[in-house]
Amino acid sequence: MGKRVDILRIVDNKPVSPDTFILTLFSESKLPEIRPGQFVQLKIEGSPITFLRRPFSVHDVDYRKKIIKLLIQIAGSGTERLSLLKVDDTLNIIYPLGNSFTLPSESMKTLLVGGGCGIAPLLFLGKYLKSNGYTPDILLGFKNSQKLIEYYEYKKLGKVFLTTEDGSAGEKGFVTDHSILKLEKYDKIYCCGPESMMKAMSSWCNSRRIQCEVSLEHLMGCGFGACLCCVVETIKGNLCSCIDGPVFNSNDLKW
Amino acid sequence: MVKLGFNIGDLHFKNPVLTASGTFGYGSEFDDFIDISRLGGIILKGTTFESREGNPYPRMAETPSGMLNSVGLQNKGIENFEKIIYPKVKEYNTNVILNVNGSTIEDYVALADRISKLEKIPAIELNISCPNVKMGGMAFGTNLKSAREVTRKVRSVYSKKLIVKLSPNVTNIVEFARAVEEEGADSVSLINTLLGMAVDVGKMQPSLSAVTGGLSGPAIKPVAVRMVWQVAKAVKIPVIGIGGIMNTNDALEFILAGASAIQVGTASFVDPQTSVKILEGIETYMSLKGFSDIADLVGYINK
């Protein structure tokens, strides 16, 4: 499957919380096949302090409309610049990059677990699972109700369970504290969010022999395996999160 | 048609655009983006005799107009190269050059000797300037005596083209260029990264696990152009310019200052098509300026 450098046009840039926005990008040509979990590298023009590209996982894809959506949290000057872009501005993009989440085996009960902006790849994954005949449950964790994003989008996919750290929405606590984990038996869990959350979730899964795939966010130089900067320590040695990941079987990670 | 070729001794390069080691993987990472066979040559990533895991994450920090890296020569060693990589890269219709590293002089010699047997590798780039390894690397390239010794000993076992990659982390790079030329180097390439450091103020710790790393990207270009200009006037062997080349204009700066060829490095991370764009840009520039042979541009400002 080919990676390409392309110029995409912004057709929407919509804030979804005070520090998070959804960038919708339109491609003149046919979109390449993108798999859930894959990411894009955006070039941010016009500033010497945003020299390298920024990686973002794909939040949603519409092949018919030739658009992709990225859910982005403002974390620094690069993402801040992106948040200020207007409709009809263009972005230089390299995509699709990285590996992807894998389909569960038949009859597996699946759960998508996302924390904060880390929920980004799970919408696309959820739609993909659904189109393949699965009905995933969804467990989302946020700091507080103000940070709660995209709830209704996920609700279209299946049952959504919520936690917030202060209890202002859903159950109080972290995702690993949610009561659904005691009530329901899952066979495969897909997880993306802050590293501490993914560690907690994967050790919860590992101790119960539940399959767990996590999508890591590592600092990247290139995004396509040339710079060897985004290495992840695994039982198979140092792997690049850009080509061997970003999705890893949590059992393979040394964390 | 303009003449773009140049030679290192009797080794012909069809054009002066090469890719810098450590920024171009083993080539295949770029197959989706460019036709590698269009390039004058590719310098494959730094290889050592034994496999190396490199330094722990984080190994990279973005800095204004550049980046720091402390990858630490992660590679799977020469045996893996011979078995897995070489059968693929030998199919590229360009000069495929391997960047050679070691912790000891014996390592460099053993590796060079082994590579000399690979028919389709017509040259090596001797890396005596990697700042990210505890043993060897830059230690050889910042001490005149050891730079001479490693060049001499590798020369004695390696009869194909020997390019020595110089470190900018020295007071007078010209001395090093002259020294390796005297010891039989066929070409020098410069500059490797500048030793640098960044601190993560939020986390209150060094940005890199290895604390220091090599600075690359456009931030270092003026330093690199100056060093290439100094070295090109001082040696007779071809000089290959490296350091922050992002576009045609940058490449031409090096050529006009005396470089016979250039290597595109960090720019390939940002735009993997940079090398081919520069190649096309140089042709356009020559036509516009009325030059038919790139040799007439090399060191033009010194004439």
Image (cartoon, rainbow, N blue to C red):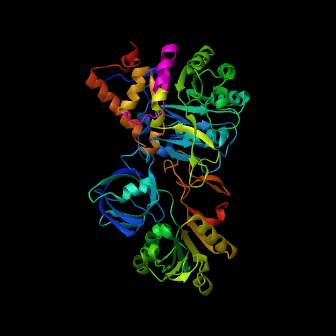
Q: Which residue is depicted at the point 62% across and 66% down?
A: A250
Quadrant for the C terminus of chain A, please.
bottom right
Q: A42 and A174: which one is in front?
A: A174
Q: Which residues are magenta?
A: B225-247
Q: Residue furthest bottom?
A: A183
Q: Vertically, is A48 above or below A184?
A: above
| Residue A110 position within the rendered picture, expressed as x and y whole percent measured from the top left | 54, 78
Quadrant for the N terminus of chain A, please.
bottom left
Q: Which residue is depicted at the point 68% across and 77% down?
A: A208
| Residue B86 position within the rendered picture, expressed as x and y whole percent measured from the top left | 58, 38
| Residue A24 position within the rendered picture, expressed as x and y whole percent measured from the top left | 34, 63
Q: A183 and A237: which one is in front?
A: A183
| Location of residue A200 (image quadrant) | bottom right
Q: Is residue B174 left or right of residue A70?
A: right
Residue B8 visible at all: no
Residue B23 visible at all: yes
